[in-house]
Image (spheres, rainbow, N blue to C red):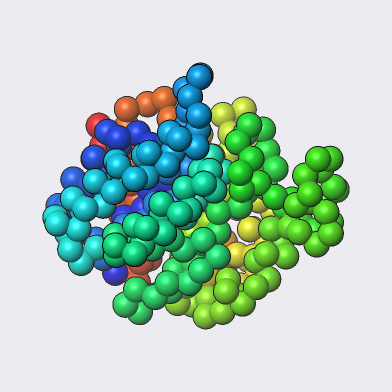
Amino acid sequence: MLAHFAADLHGDWDKYHLSGQYAAQEKPRVLILGGDNFPRANPGQNVVDVQTTFVRQLLRDFLVTLRDDSPDTKVLLVNGNTDVPETNLDLTALEREGLLTVIDFTRARVDDLDFVGYPRVNPGVSAFKHHEMRDLLADPYIPGDSRSRGDHSIEVDLQRSTFTENPKNTVCVFHAPPYDTNLDLLYAGEHVGSKAIRQFIETHQPWVTLHGHVHEAARYSGSFAHILGNSLCLTSGNEMHTPYLYVVSADLNARRARRIRFI
């Protein structure tokens, strides 16, 4: 199965347009948007208005054009920490039109593979906290964050059968990368990924995992891929302040992948 994957597009219409052109050319079976899909607000703008308008207008235009150009391509979407929850109603409307499927906490079958998405990220320096949560259950409480109380954690979330079942035929789409890999390296040399996600991958060994969130990781680590046990982990490595679009084009059944740059 041919898949295209891109995360961290942040509503950059030029990058969406390029990804749509590439999909029209290659006609992948699935196109996966891996979180931080929508634009940030400029000073003086309301981020909810900015993102809901983007979903209703530009994202819908992108999806309609893609359906016309590549009607057999199924679009799957996972949210990220900069994507506001207020877009959910508009995303549901696009699902009703058959334009995409949101896979946050949900499994979707495409041909012989299952896809499941997870939007939450471990605490970090980003000012955008919409899907941020305590990582390991044993981690300390974060003052002011009700989601870090009790047993709320990424570690506990990922114990659900939604994530653990049928790993040899499952592609997991996490917005956050696993800790201490090629996929979570900051420019300063610090690894900032999720220990719970790494623990999950090492324990359950999903067929392929896809990640975003740490924009510069592929550039500083020198690789867009990492192997954890028998799991192939990939990131697209899109950076906000460059004109380049990076798409991972992967044969998921054969677990062969390329990272392609467009400008």
Q: Is residue 28 above or below residue 23?
A: below
User: In which quarter of the view is residue 243 placed?
Assistant: top left
Q: Position of residue 84 (x, y in %)?
A: 53, 43
Q: Is residue 189 above or below residue 210?
A: above
The answer to whether residue 130 of the structure is visible from this angle is yes
Q: Position of residue 22 (x, y in %)?
A: 20, 48
Q: Residue at x 75, y 52 (%)?
A: 147
Disc count in the image? 0
Horizontally, is 123 left or right of 248 in the view?
right
Q: Position of residue 134 (x, y in %)?
A: 74, 50
Q: Of residues 48 and 149, which is closer to you in this image? A: 48
Q: Of residues 4 and 16, which is closer to you in this image? A: 16
Horizontally, is 137 left or right of 29 in the view?
right
Q: Residue at x 51, y 61 (%)?
A: 104
Q: Residue at x 83, y 54 (%)?
A: 149
Horizontally, is 214 left or right of 10 in the view?
right
Horizontally, is 163 left or right of 170 in the view?
right
Q: Of residues 51 and 205, which is closer to you in this image? A: 51
Q: Image quadrant for the C terminus?
A: top left
Q: Is residue 135 above or below residue 106?
A: above
Q: Residue at x 46, y 63 (%)?
A: 103
